[in-house]
Amino acid sequence: LFSKNEYFILILGLDNSGKTTLLEQIKTKYTKIPGLPPHRIVPTVGLNIARTQYQDIKLIYWDLGGQTQLRTIWNKFFSDVHAIIYVVDSSDKERFNESRDELEIVINDSKLKDVPLLLFFNKQDLPDAESIEYLSSVFKSVIQSCQLTNSNDQLSSLPSSPSPITTRNVQLQPLIACKGEGLEQGINWLSDCLR
Ligand code: GDP
């Protein structure tokens, strides 16, 4: 059914984190079919899919919708997944812990063992958005269980993990989904992981 060099990427995150906006940006940037402009986007109910050809690899993105009642269906898709994109609303402080706990459940699923994780800290344009440094401390338990691939020293405050428990790569990427800022860096990283 699927050809070689074709990879499934699951886009997850709480509702309102910006998953649909991200996927529409991906469509606009990487396909010939333009994505919906931000004002036409409605909350995701069910599946939203984008298929892209980027350099030598084909990526198929699945946005499963983040509403609580839909979360139980997420893991039906896990066995076919090659990478995870997890989107966080950097301004929604009340839900940081909920978002992290949700991510922990996802990455603890045995079907997703060692699958690379791109952590998009979205809405960095908002004045009350938290910094990547701060967010990395909120998500510390997740990050320390993986191999952090960020090469900048922005995250030097993050206590290094002597022995990550998986070989999963994780990259922390600031994002402004509605403008596409940070998107290319994230997708380049992901593509390199999959090659
Ligand atoms: P989803 O429920 O995760 O699919 O989230 P949506 O993509 O529907 O986005 C939720 C809301 O956040 C919408 O009002 C978007 O316009 C807004 N949004 C998404 N990305 C950004 C961003 O980078 N900056 C700002 N300021 N708003 C964003």
Image (cartoon, rainbow, N blue to C red):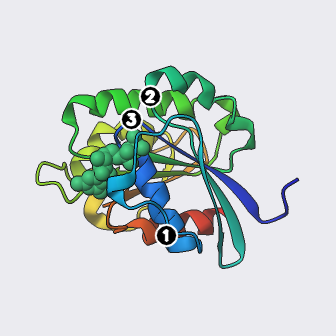
Q: Are marks 2 and 3 in contact (CB under 8 Å)?
A: yes
Residue 145: x percent and y percent?
49, 39
Front-most of residues 177 and 119 = 177
Front-most of residues 65 and 120 = 65
The residue labelled by disc 1 is 28
Q: Amino acid at mark 1?
A: Thr
How far apart in space, not on screen, are marks 1 and 2 (Cα)? 25 Å
Q: Amino acid at mark 2?
A: Gln
Q: Measuring 62% from the left and 26% from the top, which residue is drawn there? A: 73
Mark 2: few, some, or many residues within 10 Å (few <14, many ≥20)? some
How far apart in space, not on screen, are marks 2 and 3 (Cα)? 5 Å
Q: Measuring 74% from the left and 43% from the top, which residue is drawn there? A: 80
How far apart in space, not on screen, are marks 1 and 3 (Cα)? 22 Å
Apparent side of residue 172 relative to residue 89 in the rendered image (left or right)? right
Is 82 rendered above or below residue 32? above
Q: Looking at the rendering, in which quadrant would you find the C terminus?
A: bottom right
Q: Measuring 68% from the left and 36% from the top, which residue is drawn there? A: 78
Mark 2 near ligand 1 (CB under 8 Å)?
Answer: yes
Q: Is residue 46 visible?
A: yes
The residue labelled by disc 2 is 67
Q: Earlier in the sequence, mark 1 or mark 2?
A: 1
Apparent side of residue 140 relative to residue 86 in the rendered image (left or right)? left
Mark 3 near ligand 1 (CB under 8 Å)?
Answer: yes
Q: Residue furthest bottom?
A: 55
